Image (tube, rainbow, N blue to C red):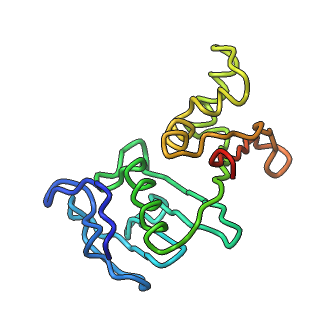
Amino acid sequence: MKVEAGYPHVEGEYGIKLDDIPFNAVSLIVGGSGKELRVLFNRRNFLVRDAIDPGCRMDATVRDDGQLSLYLVTRVHKDKHPDFFAGHFVTAALEHFKQNGVVISHFRARWLEDSDNYLEFVNNRSSLSMSSIDAARNTWTGRLMCGLGFSDVDSPRLFFHNDSIPYVEIIFSKPGE
């Protein structure tokens, strides 16, 4: 596999050596920290999960309609996973999809009420009096996606999961697409 895209890796300390991961197979690898990771890289999936705590994971998937989905959980019990770097992961995933001829038209973000992005979005709206679009662009995900060329933002919408848990949904796309 060719993707490296600047993903951090220092043997015995942190990170993931992406160029050693087989294509189209679920594999068990050892991260730079020594932790075991389960990975799956194929044409439309770029998935990494902690083998002991699978709740700690970084998943990138592209649907047939070009929608990028990300599920990034790099902290469990307040401790950051030593091999997981979400921003670098997203950049590496986009490079992986590009190398495999997968076109990404948009990214749909869904932020639950306890997520960092949701809290930052709400703070941007209430404390900083930003419009909903500017508030979305100025979250961690918004800054990352805008920096990667997905700078058009549809008006964020508020929904309720199971009629009680609020979440915000936003679509980021490339201008003119």
Q: Residue furthest right?
A: 163
131 displayed left or right of 9: right
Q: Quadrant of the N terminus?
A: bottom left
- Percent across and percent down for residue 175 are 65, 44
Of all residues, the one furthest to the left in this rendering is: 12
Measuring from the top left, give residue 31's x and y in whole percent: 25, 65
Residue at horizontal 64%, vertical 33%?
136
Q: Quadrant of residue 23?
A: bottom left
Q: Give 44 or 56, whichever is nearer the viewer.
A: 44
131 over 177 or under it: above or below = above
Q: Furthest-bottom residue in view?
A: 25
User: What residue appears at the point 64 percent right and 14 percent down from the top-left corner?
Assistant: 127
In the rendered structure, the answer to whether residue 84 lies left or right of residue 69 reads left
Seen in the image, is 17 located left or right of residue 125? left
Residue sitting nearer the eye, 67 or 30: 67
Q: Position of residue 28 (x, y in %)?
A: 33, 78
Q: Give above or below for 66 relative to 157.
A: below
